[in-house]
Amino acid sequence: MPTPTTSRLDGSWRRLLGGSGVVLTLKVLGALGGFVFSVWVARSLGDAALGRAELFILWVTVGATLLRGGWEGAVVKAFGAWTFQGQGARIRRAFRRWTGAMVLIGLAVAGLGSLGFAEEWGPSPWIGWGMGAWVVIGWLAECLRGTGHVSTYALFQPGWWMLLAGLLIFFGIEDPALALALSGLVMAALAVLGAGWWFGKRFQADGSQEGNGNISMARLAFPIWLGSVLHLVLSWADTAMLSAWLTEADVAHYRAAFRLAALLTFTQFAVNALGAPTFGAQHAAGDQEGLRRTVHRIGWLNTAVALPGLVFLWLLGPWLLSWWGAAFVCREAVMALGILAGAQALNALSGPVMYLLNMTGGERAGLAILALSALIQLALGLWLVPAHGLVGAAWSAAIGMGVWNVVGLIWVRRTQGFWMVSLANGWWKRR
């Protein structure tokens, strides 16, 4: 007979379905904004301009992730646990203290960019503004996710940033990097005001709730930061290598294929947004059966989207690439799309492997798996990209993604006692 705690955690499945639908809708709309930006820049300003915009996004993503120091990942676990324990006042105090630090970091980086130091950091003088803005945006998004407010979290994703930048380009800003920098600053300001108001309204001050999470947060943040660095390698090494050996136009062609392939993980993004805090709560409560059910249900949702989506991309890939322009329907881009789509389908079918490891005490194992995958991808990229261009980059990314998913699945089986791939686990059975 289920305990009250188990029943309450298992009841999160309804929240997972309902909340994931909202998040998925916002994610789709945001992704459409990203596609609009990408297509608009390619058609109005040219392939090379889109390549420069993609490299600007790369530098902003890398810089902001490094500067946040892993605290945005640690806060999901901390706030998720404190929310489950009813420690609202502790969340309120921690949010104010840590957000203040992140805002100061963001302002410092943006200020250095304004003084001209940004010329040394990347491909655009506006890079400091973009990095500073995304230090703050990324932090606040994860704070909201940690407390279960995932619909607003979904609004703070890169697609919406790119949509706003696209509007600025439409109204006359011809430099995509400047448009991205300005839209980032606007989003950061709105995020600070909105999240500050929401946390102050939801969590009331209570002096009876004591506790200082600084030490444990710092210890938790460091391995998460290392994991984020490795994720950056796995996510962006292919693009960075293309920029080193090929042209900006080639970068644009590859990123168009990458964006299309990433459509297969839409559902995974949505359910992971709610699933990660749920994993942590179920693990803390010792509800192993509930954890298994949640993982398999998430796997089923991913499977229902990924398999038909894979067939769709393989059949209609050239037509979809033609939206960006005739130059994008080249043999290399079409082949890269097919390879990347297969890898993303495997990623979706495997489920939230790294999320599960990070939320259930398997951070060290996750780091080792990501490190192995990153080393393999880097080695393959250095060999394949100079020789085979876009196709080589796609194969290096696909193999790196495959390694961390397969090894992660084996590790979860060893430590948790179940296979995460719901398709091979009887997801059709009533649970």
Image (cartoon, helix red, strand yellow):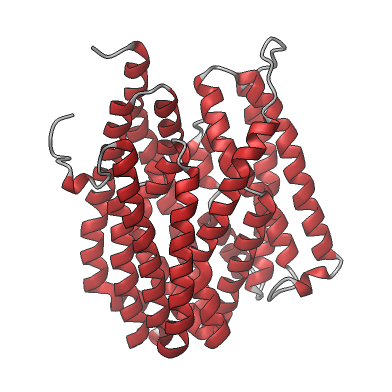
Can residue 302 be seen at all in this image of the molecule?
A: yes
Q: Which residue appears farthest toward the right when viewing the image? A: 115
Vertical comparison of 395 with 364: above or below: below
Residue lying at 65% horizontally and 58% vertically, measured from the top left: 183
Res 267 visible: no
Q: Which quadrant would the C terminus be assigned to in this image? A: top left
Q: Position of residue 9 (x, y in %)?
A: 36, 22
Q: Name the foreground residue: 61 vs 353.
A: 353
The answer to which of 166 and 258 lies nearer the viewer is 258
> Which residue is drawn at the image coordinates 56% and 23% (left, top)?
82
Viewed as shown, does residue 426 lie left or right of 216? left
- Name the residue: 36% across, 33% down: 16
Residue 108 in the figure: left or right of residue 411: right
- Residue occupying the point 43% across, 90% down: 387
Q: Is residue 126 above or below residue 74?
A: below
How far from the left and from the top, in percent, is residue 399?
36, 69
Q: Is residue 109 above or below residue 195?
A: below
* Residue 21 percent across, percent down from the top left: 35, 40
Residue 103, image x and y in percent?
Answer: 75, 45
